[in-house]
Amino acid sequence: MTVYKVERELFEMFPAFKRGVIVAKGIDNNGMDPETARLLLRAASDANRVSAAVEQERIGVWNNAYSRFGANPEKYTPSIRFLRDQISRGKPPRSISRLVDVFNIVSLKWTIPCGGDDLDSLAGGDLRLGFASGDETFAPLFKPFAIEHPLPGEVIYYTPPTRRVLCRRWTWRNSDFSKIRPETQAVAINVDMMMPPFSDADLELALGDLAKLVRRFCGGTLCTHIVEPSNPQFAIELGVGTQISLTTQGSGSEILGLTGKEGAEDKDL
C-alpha cells in the first residue's frame, strides 16, 4: 500500500492550494500517437489566445508561491511558466509519448502544472508533497548519476522511506527514476491549482479533461481524488490485475473502468 499525502505544513503556508490526482493502472503508453501530437499542437496554439490578464494571474500565483518558500521564479521557473515561455518564443512542446502529451495538453488548456510519475518505480514507497530537510537525494531527468540534495525548506515531492525526490521545487524539475517510460503501466498524475484564481469546479473539470484523454489514448483503470487541507491523504493499493483500489480519507473518490482508447464524446476537448 502506498500512502499519498500533502503535509500539513505545506497547507499551512499555502491554504489556497489543492491537488487533483488521477491514479491509473493497466495503461498502455507504448508507441507514439499522431493524434496526441495534433492535440498538443492545437493546445499550444490555443494557449496564445488566452488573455494576458488571465495568464498573468494563473502564472503569477506560482511565481508568488515559489518566492514564499525561497525559490527565485526567475531562476527556477515553475513548469507552467516555462511551458508558456517556450511557446511565446515559438518553441511549442514536442510530442514525447501519449501520456506525456496528455499532461501537456491539460497543462496548456488550463494554464496549470500537470505531470505524473511511474508508480512501479517506487517499489511500494509512500508519496509526500512537503518541505525538504536537505538530506533527501535527487537525480535529474536523464542524469541518473548526477546526485543532488534539495535545499532545506524547498518544496519537494518525495518518497519518505527512501528519501528519494521525484520533483524539486514543487513543479520545477523531474527525477530520472520515476520518469514516464514506454513500458509504464501505473501512474499517479498530479493537477495543481490555487484557489483563487481557480475554483473547485475548475479542478473537477480539469480532472475530467485529463481522465478522458488518458482513457482515450492509454486505456486502463482510473481513479480520481482531490487532496486539500480537510482531506490531506489517501492510500493506493496496486495489486495484480487491472483494478485500482483507492481508500480515501474525507471526500470520496471515483473509480472508472476505462479500458477503451476511443470514445465519440472524447474526440476533442
Image (cartoon, grey):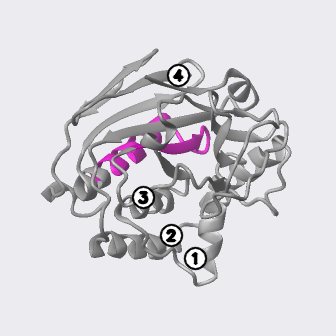
Q: Are marks 1 and 2 in contact (CB under 8 Å)?
A: yes
Magenta segment range? 187-212
Q: Determine whether, in the image, residue 86 is placed left or right of residue 222.
A: right
Residue type at mark 2: give it: Ala
Horizontal and vertical percent position of residue 185: 33, 47
SS for dot 2: helix
Residue indicated by mark 1: 87
Mark sitting on residue 233: 4
Horizontal and vertical percent position of residue 80: 61, 59
Toward the bottom, the furthest residue is: 90
Toward the top, the furthest residue is: 250
Residue indicated by mark 3: 181
Q: Quadrant of the N terminus?
A: top left
* Spatial separation of the CA atoms under disc 1 and disc 2: 8 Å
Q: Residue at x 68, y 53 (%)?
A: 139
Residue type at mark 4: give it: Gln
Q: Is residue 102 visible?
A: yes
* Spatial separation of the CA atoms under disc 2 and disc 4: 32 Å
Mark sitting on residue 47: 2
Task: Indicate which label's residue lies in the foreground, 1 or 2.
Answer: 1
Residue type at mark 3: give it: Arg
